[in-house]
Image (spheres, helix red, strand yellow):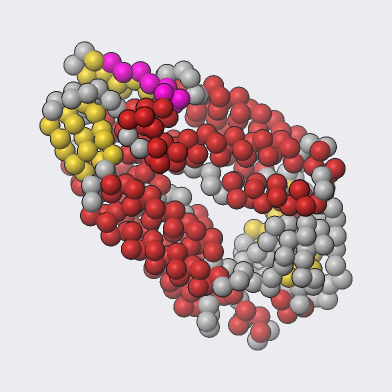
Amino acid sequence: MILACKHCDSLVRVSSLGEHQRAICPCCKNEIVSYQANQQQWLIAFSLTSLLFLFSSLYPSFVSFSQHGLVQNISLWNAFSLLADEYSVVLSGIFVFSTFLIPLFVCLLVLLTNSHYWQDLNPHNARYLARLLNKTKTLNLADIFLIAVLVSVFKLMSLADIGFGLGFWAYILFVVCFIETLSLINETELWERQMLFQPALLHDGKSAKAQELKQCLTCSQLTRETHCPRCYTKTYFRKPNSAQRAIVWMLTATVFLIPANLLPIMNTVNLGNETPATIFSGVVVMWQSGSYPVAILIFLASICIPIIKAAALFYLILQSRKCTHPKRASTIYRWLEIMGKWSMIDVFVVIILVSLVQLGTVLSVEPRIGIVFFTIMVLCQIVAVNSFDPRILWDKFHNHE
């Protein structure tokens, strides 16, 4: 079987893989495909287990706070409702969407695509389901939310006594099972079960574009046609206007980055005293209180990573015109994909504190406009990175092969 690398467009011949083996592109070192024995059975098992723990975490007590005789027990479901009713429907929507709806959709889609119904689906319908699965799995923020919970606990330890309920431990088990589910999803194997189509190829080791082959963005099928013969998606040699779209989205993110760092993101009320906090002031407070790992994590995720991502993407866009080190550029792009969601830690910290900490004037947290700008900035950066086509970094290199 010959597959095209999604990062450098090189054609790679992949032989039968053994258990826990994966195929790596010899050109850019990107992972092309992996294999695990009994993959379908494991996917179904972990998806069902993830759903079980996800629903088990909604209604039991998640976190409890107590200060000066006042005690608050709150579940995830109550947190969703409180945030929507008292403060922000937008923040509540982000909360529900990322911690509940996205994992729910992914698990249900995994169960559907690994059932006998998948092979009986019309390719048109299969295309939409595959697109939905591909988009939703990249939006996994459950692990980031869990880290944000721990960061929030460190922030509150000096202000209140904190306890964890059954909902918290169920959510930890859900995150573990869900991450394993995502790691087992194999799009190549998924489409081979739906339909197998192999065009006549010239030479593996060369780029697909050099042989007038286009890679379908939905099912990775190689074809010379204007529409994919397997899922009927319109095909392109490269994502249309990828560099231009990436520039627009990243410039938008850069504009929002300024008020996101200058304006307060939340307001803490402790015994009647209000303390507004920006991202940087929160880092300073954590550092002064001795929570050095948390301070470093927030500083890197919320301040350094957005700046590094913007600079790195602009560098890749400049390199796309005449890339002299495409392998290094591909490595940078892979790191951009990995770093994408980590900036959401501060967004979740504010959402968690606002929705879980409500003891009136004794202790409460309120959101401020800065967190809205910060959320928009993070989402624009994620879209910018996904809009960029890393294969254009290799076009000049392949032309001189």
Q: Which residue is at 49% across, 78% downward?
A: 319
- Out of 208 and 116, give the one closest to the viewer: 116
Q: Quadrant of residue 159?
A: top left
Q: Considering the image in quadrants, where does the N terminus appear?
A: bottom right
Residue 263, image x, y percentages: 23, 51
**In magenta segment, residue 73:** yes
Q: Is residue 334 at least partly visible in the picture?
A: no
The residues colored magenta run: 71-78
Q: Quadrant of residue 92?
A: top left
Locate residue 247 relative to residue 237 in the image: left or right: left
Residue 113: tell me if it is visible. yes
Say whether residue 8 is left or right of residue 1: left
Percent coordinates x, y for residue 133 in the rendering: 65, 46
Q: On screen, 392 above or below 365?
A: below
- The residue positioned 35% from the left and 18% from the top of the image is 73
Query: Looking at the image, is 194 positioned above or below residue 181?
Result: below
Task: Tell me where residue 372 appears, x and y as whole percent.
Answer: 34, 48
Residue drawn 38% across and 49% down?
Answer: 375
